[in-house]
Amino acid sequence: MMISETDRNIHSPLAYSMEVSSPARFHQLILRLSDGPKAKGLCMVRKNKQESPFIRASSNEIHKPVMAGEIADIAKKYLSGDTSKVYVDGTLGLGGHAGIILSELPNIFLIGLDRDKSSIDLASKNLAKLGLDKRYSLHNDSFDNFYEYFEGGGYQSFDFMLLDLGFSSFQIEDPYRGFSYRLDSKLDMRMNPNQKLSAYEVINEFSEHDLSMILKKFGDEKFHYRIAKAICDRRPISSTFELNEIIKYAIPAATRRTGGHPSQRTFQAIRIYVNSEFEQLYRGLIKGLETLDPMGLIVVLTYHSGEDRIVKNIFDAAIKGTCRCPETIPCSCGAPKLFGFPIPRKGLRPSEVELKENPRAKSAHLRVIQKLDFGSSSQEIGSAICRLIQENIPLEKYVLSLSSGFKRGTT
C-alpha cells in the first residue's frame, strides 16, 4: 500500500517529521531545530479521504491554472478580432489555460500537446464540457514537435504559444508516478510511461560521477557529491522514501534543520534528466521563434531557476538579433530588431491575491516575447536569428554528456 507523508501521524512538536501543511504549521520552526527521534505519547492522526487523483484533478474548484488572469489578458490584447488565430499549448495539462482562452476568444483554434496521455484524456473531457469540440486538436507528444501537427490543419505558422512548465497536481499526487518526495512510491518520474529510461535506472545504474553531475547541473544541489556517493553505497533503491532517507543522512545535520525538504533538489534534478526537460525547452523555443507569425507571442511560465535561465537567455538573444554591437553601447550597426518584449523584460510574478489562494504559484515567473512585422522578410530574418542563437548559445550549454549507457527520452 502506498503511504503519503500527509497520511502519517502528526507527532508532538519535538518530532522532526511533522507534516508542514497540517494545522500544526506553527511548529515548523521547532521541527527544524530538532533532529531527534519521534516523540512518544499522544499524537494527532490525520485521515485523508481516499480518492482518485484523476477525479480530483477534473474538478474546476481544485485545478487552478497559474497566472490565468494575466495570460488571458495578454491573449485578449493581442489576439482579439475577426481573423482566425492559431494557439499552440505545448504543455496542455488539464486544459485550464486553454479553456479560458478558447472561451474568451472565439477566433482561436488550439493545437494542444502533452507527453502525459492521462493529461490529454482529462483535458479533452474538460474542454468538451465547455462546448469547444470543433476548435481544438489534441496530441500526445512533447511540445518541441508541435510543428508536425500543422499540416493536418493546413497551418504553416502560429500566433500564440503557451508553455506552462509546471506539473499538474494530479501528477504530483499520483502515488504510482514517483514525482513527489512526500509520497512513498516506486521510483519512476516519467512523463511518458512508454519511455524506457526512468528514475529507477538513473538511481541504480548510473555511475557516481554521472549522478553527481546530474544533481549539480539540474538541481543546483550543493551536496551533489555526498548524495551521489551515498546513493551508490546503498543500492539497490526502489522507492521514493528509501531515497529520501539516504539523501537526508548524506546532507549535514545543520543544513537539514534549515530550508526546505532535503530531497527537493535531488528529485527535481532526476526528473529533469529523465524527461529531457531542458533539451525539450531549448528546441521548442528555437522552433517557436522561427515559426511564429509576425505580431505573434510566445508566453512561458517557469518554476525554477534552471529553466528560467534558458528562457531568459534565448529571449535576450532573440531581441539582440543579428546585432554585433557590444552590450555596453547602443546599436549602431542597423541590424533589424525582429523581436520585442510586450511586457517588462524581467517578466511578471503572481499577485498576492493568487499566492494566498494557490501557494504553489509562489515560484512562478512569466516571460513573454513578440515577433515584430518585417513583411515578407520576417521569416528569413527569423531563421537567421535562430541560427545565430544556436551558434552563440548551443544546446550543450544546458545538457550533459554522461558516460552512462542510457539515452535521455529514449522510447
Image (tube, grey):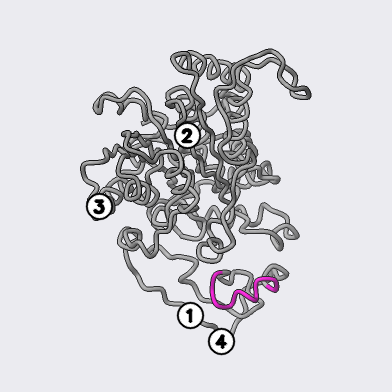
Whether 33 is drawn above or below 297: the answer is below
Q: Which amino acid does label 2 sit on?
A: Leu
Rendering coords of residue 28 (x, y %): 65, 71
Which residue carries the number 3 mark? 125
Frontmost residue, 394 versus 210: 394
Of circles 1 and 2, the one toward us is 2
What residue type is disc 1 on? Val
Q: What stretch is highlighted in magenta?
A: 21-30
Which of discs 3 and 4 lies nearer the camera? The answer is 3
| Residue 335 lies in quadrant | top right
Residue under numbered circle 4: 42
Q: What residue type is labelled 3?
A: Lys
Quick check: 312 left or right of 59? Answer: right
The crowd level at tag 4 (other Cα within 10 Å; few <14, some 14-19, many 20+) is: few
Give the alpha-carbon distance from disc 3 to disc 4, as whole Å. 46 Å
Q: Which residue lies furthest to the right in this view?
A: 328
Quadrant occupied by the C terminus: top left
Give the mark nearest the N terminus, 2 or 4: 4
Query: Label 3 to label 1, Cα distance in Å?
Result: 36 Å
Q: Callout 1: helix, strand or loop?
A: strand
